[in-house]
Amino acid sequence: MTSTSQPTALITGAGRGLGLALAHSLLASGWRVVVDARRTAHLAADLPGAFVVPGDVTDPDHRDALASAVAAVGRLDLLVNNASDLGPSPLPRLADVPVAAARRVLETNVLAPLALTQRLLPLLRASGGTVMNVSSDAAVEAYEGWGAYGSSKAALDQLTAVLAAEEPGLAVYAVDPGDMRTEMHQAAFPGEDISDRPEPEAVVPALLRLIATRPPSGRVRAADLAGTAA
Amino acid sequence: MALDFILPAGLEAAEPPPARDGVRLLVASADGVRHARFGQLGEFLAPGDLVVVNTSATLAAAVTASRSGVPVEVHFSAELDDGSWVIEVRPAGVSAGPVDNLRPCEVITLDAGAALIVGEPHPAGQARLWRARPRIDGGVAAFLARHGRPIRYAYVPRQWPLPEYQTVFAREPGSAEMPSAGRPFTAQVVTDLITRGVAMAPIALHTGVSSQEPGEPPQPERFRVPAATARLVNSTRAAGGRVIAVGTTVTRALESAAEPDGSVRERHGWTDLVLGPARPARTVTGLVTGWHAPGASHLALLAAVAGSALVERAYAEAVRFGYRWHEFGDSCLLLP
């Protein structure tokens, strides 16, 4: 039997990388976890117990399905907008980036989190919940080739900041996890050796610390949350 | 510090005494040590003295819970300003200490579909007490009233009902453990004090769980010293009367509201005051206390009011004469 008091998290883009690692950790800690991913075949084995909704966050029907899954649980304590689109690989300079690709990046990284947050705000307000938007240092630093992705994350940061001002009952964070050894990071540096970057699992304790300590809403860097007593 | 005692085994009070005011009272003053019953308290006080009591009521703060199917006992220690709670999680049954492997974000499931989301150690720097966010319909107080039981440690072999853990002064629920120095008071004792011209006044301080590790400082506690009590304390001091705190909780509350000159102001909030050699008592000039496992911070507080020599003498006499320890045990009046 499940109970309505068991805390529940929705994590987008949990098929790989940081989303998968965070979902794994919350499940192990006793949370109910709803996840989505475009590729989900492996998740039955990798995330036993999770509620898996296959799909793409830019698809309104898929967002409806996610909202329905959460509504079936009846509560939401944590929304993690983690699903992201890097854009073309290798990363083109702004002079060369196809506008259609940039639009697609903004759809995934800005508008989808906005739409999903709108859908789930009533449940988040009811629980005094937490919204965690996964950002990047590319949102604040001018890295060549990162124009589309970086500007989308900058927009997500500002969306986060305004949501925090409008919803004082929620904890709202834009989190820069730092570089990680993920498929997305490899796509940004094709052919390069990224094995010096930490595994996404190494960042999870910082995210758990953020959820657990619930500091004032704002933009945070996982590196500043290190020293975690997990 | 010089004060250190071994608590002799077999002197723990394992159950409530037949009559609250029938427990023994050791009176330690500059004139020496006397042995009496608690019902005689008034004989050792003078008209114009002020006895200050704690009106915090004890919660049924212990509940059965589960960590992923493993039964545990959760002790609710204090509610924080943001609605989260400080908790201690211990193995099921009467255990010797807390579990040692809690993790942030861990979910602890309670009865009736309720749950706690574990946060971080609180305060930081230890791993016994943790912050947790309750997911409890109807609130924690109602949940504890329905599903909780008083916190009990191994020296009390059976569970006693909550009224055994309430003092006659208990009004506002909020203490994880009974402010036990007030337990021997009865309506009759209070009437006797009032009739003798001894005044009484209330404060509230909600106690946290007491299961400190050696060397661990006392945790912050929520307290309130009302304006009327502050006035009574100040007029008592001005007239040369003694301010007798019933328990370390009352001492901590009054001293947290004390100015450097010893006068007291209305005050409420959280106190992290630690009394000791560096911060002796300013206001409290006498103390009614139970006999407790003499942890360093407890003894430092007694010594801050009564001086180490008097406390040392009182403890030595109590051990010699077989006084009973802990919340159901005998009592002590320190009058330096």
Image (spheres, coloured by chain):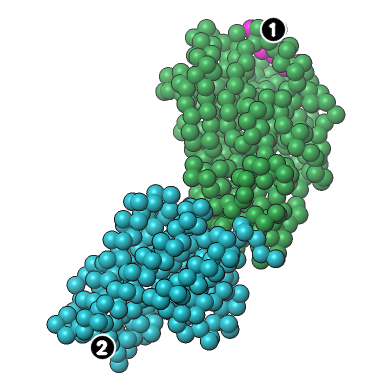
Chain colours: A cyan, B green
Q: Residue furthest front?
A: A61
Task: Confirm whether residue B144 shows in the render.
Answer: yes
Q: Quadrant of the C terminus of chain B?
A: top right
Residue type at the position of mark 2: Pro
Place of residue B235 in the rendered image (x, y in percent of width and height, measured from the top left)? 51, 10
Q: Which residues are magenta?
A: B40-47
- Name which quarter of the figure residue B159 lies in: top right
Q: Is residue B268 above or below residue B65?
A: above
Residue underneath mark 2 = A90
The structure residue drawn at horizontal position 79% and vertical position 26%, both measured from the top left corner, is: B20
Q: Do the residues at pointers 1 and 2 share their chain?
A: no
Viewer-closest of A226 and A54: A54
Residue bearing mark 1: B196
Badge nearest the viewer, 1 or 2: 2
Question: Does A78 sit left or right of B294 as displayed?
Answer: left
Would residue B274 appear left or right of A132 to someone viewing this image?
Answer: right
- Indicate whether B322 appears above or below B234: below
- Between the C-alphas of marks 1 and 2, the distance is 91 Å
**What's the residue at 46%, 80% (across, down)?**
A55
B18 and A188: which is toward the camera:
A188
